[in-house]
Image (cartoon, helix red, strand yellow):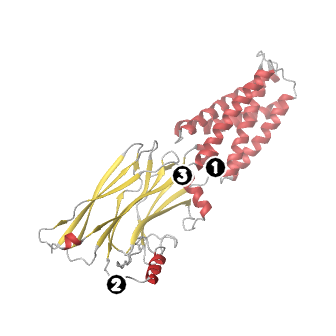
Amino acid sequence: MIVTLIVLVLLLTAAHLALFGLDDFMHALAFSGRITGALLVVASITTFLGAAAVLDYAFGGCFPHSGLVALIGTVAALVTNAMLTLEAARDGDSTYWTVGWGLLTVASAWAVYAVWRTSVQVPAPKRVAAAVIVSTAVALGNFGYQHLYQPYQRGGRPLITLNVGKAMVSQDRKTFAVPVDIKIENHNDVGFYVLGAEFHAMGERVPLTAKDRLRMQWRTDAQQQREFRERSPLARREVHAPGQMVMAQPWMDAGDWLEASDSFVTRTVVQLPLNTQYDRLAFYATASFGRKDRLGLDHFELPRYSWRDGKAPEWAKPDDVDCVIYRSRVHENNAIDNHTRDPRYLSVYWRFSAHGAGVTYTVARKGEENLQLDPDHTHEMLSRYGIVDAGAGPIEQTLWDIKRQR
């Protein structure tokens, strides 16, 4: 009966280690995940051989070291089951896997004790102990790096630059156009998914006063720095008002990607009437990215619209702001988290109004998209999936020269 239970524990352990190990070895997004998969496969083979050795040792087989192999197999099962239990309890959502691995950990500890108490003969015990300790340390070190340390390290980010060209007047001299080149460069050694990318241009009126402005007016300008995205200077004669959006558009599609050492350039054109009331134009380009070694994305669903069929949460859609909503299923970068965590979904909100545009996002379980994350959960989300934001602007250009051609 005892032999049957030990063999059952080892075979169950070998089966799920092979399942997770092969999945990680073939599909993990990071190289360290592939190494974890390989180690789990090795542990699975060791555990399976341990089960065979238990039968051989119990029934007086011909293999002289079957007792030692049985002991190594049970120790391998104990170590891997304990690590998986800790990972599921620390970071998983599945009670099934946490309880299952916990029971296997207890059963593996009992199996180690049951095999050890049969007075297994260990040749060269110091060497065997050293080999077990070293292999365990390697497994623990790689497992800790893959599942504890690495997800919370943030790397670099792509670089976005704006190049504003010379304004050109139309043939009928009623309108003018300003070409803007948007360039993104990835100088990092990992690729990035594009979660959302937007470009917008703001028109600004900046009249001059006849006399120096009072200090109290400077204080009012400083207070408005927190209320508007535009960072207007404190000026002695210029009177800055909140800008008005004259154009906004995505410049890369959600779900596109940028490989390591890759770049992308696009051009957009901003057109306005020659008699425009604005004195300046300010150009902005921003984007959000997720590291390809931290998350996988399904194809994005068809976009939804806050004013029609897609309800946006209050935190993403203040008053007088419209949203285009993109959603995609998120996959973790390793098999263990994919099985032990509930499915997560990325929601991207391209927001725009008369006073600007921007992109925001969240990763949450289905039905929890409307919950606003607190700072700790936001930091955990950004770190786990390697999400970074990049931007360029404001790049300002005066319109005096072009308006003078009326």
Query: For the point 87% across and 26% down, which residue is it?
Result: 118
Indicate the amino acid at tag 3: Tyr
- Amino acid at circle 1: Thr
* Residue 276 rendering spot, x and y as whole percentages: 24, 76
Give the alpha-carbon distance from disc 3 to disc 1, as whole Å: 16 Å
Q: Are marks 2 and 1 in contact (CB under 8 Å)?
A: no
Where, quadrant-wise, is the N terminus in this rendering? Answer: top right
The residue identified by callout 2 is 211
Residue 96 in view of the camera: no
Q: Viewed as shown, does residue 364 lie left or right of 182?
A: right
Q: Which residue is mark 1?
A: 340
Quarter of image, res 168: bottom left
Residue 42: x and y, percent? Answer: 64, 30
Under circle 3, the secondary element is: helix
Which residue is under mark 3? 385
Cα–Cα span, label 2 and label 1:
68 Å
What is the CA distance from the residue labelled 2 to the residue labelled 3? Answer: 53 Å
**Side (left or right) of 243 relative to 68:** left
Q: Which residue type carries mark 2? A: Lys
Callout 2 crowding tier (Cα within 10 Å): few <14, some 14–19, many ≥20: few
